[in-house]
Structures are given as structure tokens and as C-alpha cells.
Image (cartoon, rainbow, N blue to C red):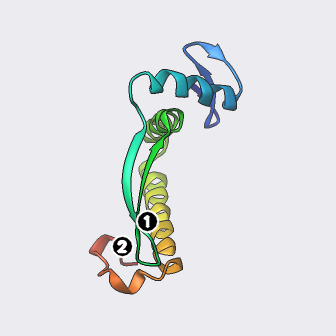
Amino acid sequence: MTFEAGVPKSVNGKEMKVSDIIRELNELGGKHGIGIVDIVENRVVGMKSRGVYETPGGTILMAAHEQLEELVLDRATYEVKKTLEINSHRSYMRENGIHHCVKPSRHLSM
């Protein structure tokens, strides 16, 4: 897979649109069971919900992009990115009213 300015451009040497890349990765990854997620979610209203999701193309694309970021981002930028991801999780917890239930770990305290 190749990227230009962080955007996927080709798979196996064949240039295509991003939507076609995802379709191609869905086909390739789906053959090998990549991207199957079986989870039990705890809903805000107190019930549990089980979901099985298949995202082979998205899983492959995200893994490739994360590896690209590790290669091209300097340490400080990569750390800021990780911090923003943690803050995004904290915002989700606040939005769903669960921030008071979780004792913050040392790396989440800011």
C-alpha cells in the first residue's frame, strides 16, 4: 500500500480511489478473517448489547496508517497525537456520564 500526504493511493501497485482501496482491502482481508470484532457493549441505560462487526478494509488501512505515522512523525508529534487520543476517550467518558465511575490512572491525569 502506498500513501501520499497520509492518504492511501494504491494497493499492490494498483492506483485507485480511497473507496476502491477499502473495497479491495475488504476482499483481501475478508478471505483471511481480518477485522472481525465480537464485543459486548455496556450501554448507558444499563443493558448489555452484543455485536459482531466485520471491518477488514478499515482494520488493514488503520494498521498501515499507524505504521506510517510511526515512521514519519517525530517523537514530540507522536506523543501529542497519543495525548489527543487519550483526551478524546476522556471526552467520550464525560459525554456518557461515566467519568465519575473511573479512577483516573496516572497517565490520564492532565
Position of 14 with respect to 103 (left or right) is: right
Whether residue 23 is visible here, answered yes or no, is yes
The amino acid type found where label 1 is placed reads: Ile
Instruction: State the image coordinates of residue 23 (x, y, percent, origin top left).
Output: 61, 27
Which residue is disc 1 drawn over? 86
Which residue is disc 2 drawn over? 108
Against 47, residue 56 (above or below) is: above
The residue drawn where x is 61% and y is 37% is: 6
Q: Secondary structure at mark 1?
A: helix
Instruction: State the image coordinates of residue 70 (x, y, percent, origin top left).
Output: 43, 41
Position of 51 with respect to 21 (left or right) is: left
Q: Earlier in the sequence, mark 1 or mark 2?
A: 1
Q: Are marks 1 and 2 in contact (CB under 8 Å)?
A: yes
Within 10 Å of disc 1 (Cα), the crowding (few <14, some 14-19, many 20+) is some
The residue drawn where x is 67% and y is 17% is: 15
Out of 56 and 94, give the one closest to the viewer: 56
Q: What residue occupies the far bottom of the structure in this picture? A: 100
Out of 52 and 33, give the one closest to the viewer: 52
Mark 1 vs mark 2, CA separation in Å: 7 Å
Against 41, residue 105 (above or below) is: below
Within 10 Å of disc 2 (Cα), the crowding (few <14, some 14-19, many 20+) is few
Against 38, residue 45 (above or below) is: below
Whether residue 1 is visible here, answered yes or no, is no
Q: Secondary structure at mark 2?
A: helix
Instruction: State the image coordinates of residue 28 (x, y, percent, origin top left).
Output: 49, 21
Q: What residue occupies the far top of the structure in this picture? A: 13
Against 2, residue 109 (above or below) is: below
